[in-house]
Image (tube, rainbow, N blue to C red):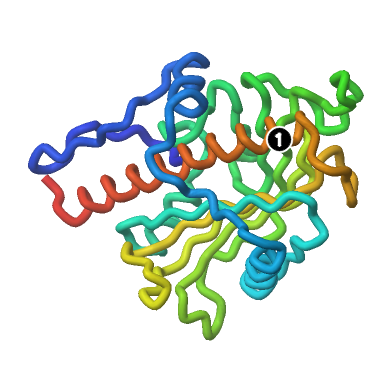
């Protein structure tokens, strides 16, 4: 999820065993066909369970996700400090082994994270383009992300050392919010690594505030989103741990 390309061998022969995609077929293999190495999706066992997470999101980043039909949260532990993980997130432009950039091309306006356009196969069109698919959405615009808040330092009295990027999401189907959130691990919750990374997406399909029950399009989209997000989370974890280990023990 970061800009630079690392050598695959670090100090003392420390290898980064992640395949790097060189094209669309590589993206399909690594992010869609391969089975994720870790299960990262947080599953809600009941409406009360979802409400508890929604309340936590409101308390931590000030967003009410109860109004959205879909709520997907992925979590993964990373053996690196939260401050280091956030620095890596701030370098994101899609051009790395952590993101399927050949299929979902990331474009940063003015090379900044405040405005991001993610386009199908690298093709783009103006946000207000009238070109629509048969479903009524602009198929070239997968996501348009506009930053609502980028919390670069922990808030006052934040004992969890949390930092995050929060976006309004539009374009394509999902209309809602997207966030990448890192904090120090909480041992009382059984978290063993130094830090935890959360990737949250909450939205309504087709821009409707109260959309209908799930249909086949919704189900397929959610399944694809969850598989890709699991791969992205795991690859980001491995890359950060590898880089941080090399930083601690330089050649």
Q: Residue 54: in sight, yes or no?
A: yes
Q: Closer to the camera, 71 or 148?
A: 71
In the rendered image, residue 244, in percent from the top left (x then y), is placed at 27, 52
**Above or below, 121 relative to 197:** above
In the rendered image, residue 150, in percent from the top left (x then y), is placed at 61, 60
Relative placement, left or right, of 80 versus 228 is: left
Q: Tell me which residue sits at (43%, 54%) in the image.
A: 76
Q: Tell me which residue sits at (62%, 72%) in the image.
A: 60
- Judging from the image, what secondary structure is the residue with disc 1 in? helix
**Above or below, 151 relative to 101:** below
Q: Closer to the camera, 103 or 31?
A: 31
| Quadrant of the image containing the C terminus | top left
In the rendered image, residue 127, in percent from the top left (x then y), is placed at 82, 33
In the rendered image, residue 145, in percent from the top left (x then y), is placed at 70, 44
Q: Which residue lies under the disc numbered 1? A: 219
Q: Closer to the camera, 124 or 121?
A: 121
Residue at the far front in the pictured view: 45
């Amino acid at each position: 999820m970061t800009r630079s390309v690392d050598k695959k061998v670090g100090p003392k022969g420390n290898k980064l065993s992640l395949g790097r995609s060189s094209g669309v077929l590589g993206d399909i293999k690594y992010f869609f066909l391969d089975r994720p190495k870790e299960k990262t999706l947080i599953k809600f066992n009941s409406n009360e369970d979802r409400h508890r997470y929604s309340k936590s999101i409101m308390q931590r980043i000030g967003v009410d996700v109860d109004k959205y039909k879909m709520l997907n949260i992925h979590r993964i532990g990373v053996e690196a400090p939260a401050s280091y993980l956030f620095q890596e997130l701030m370098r994101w432009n899609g051009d790395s082994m952590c993101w399927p950039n050949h299929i979902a091309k990331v474009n940063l306006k003015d090379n900044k994270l405040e405005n991001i356009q993610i386009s199908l196969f690298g093709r783009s069109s103006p946000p207000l383009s009238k070109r629509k698919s048969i479903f009524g959405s602009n198929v070239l615009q997968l996501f348009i992300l506009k930053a609502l808040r980028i919390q670069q330092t922990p808030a006052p009295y934040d004992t969890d050392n949390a930092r995050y990027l929060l976006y309004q999401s539009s374009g394509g189907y999902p209309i809602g919010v997207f966030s990448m959130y890192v904090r120090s691990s909480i041992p009382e919750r059984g978290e063993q690594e130094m830090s935890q990374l959360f990737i949250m997406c909450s939205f309504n399909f087709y821009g409707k505030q109260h959309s209908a029950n799930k249909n086949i399009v919704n189900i397929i989209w959610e399944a694809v989103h969850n598989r890709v997000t699991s791969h992205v989370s795991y690859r980001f974890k491995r890359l950060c741990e590898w880089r941080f280990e090399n930083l601690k023990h330089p050649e």
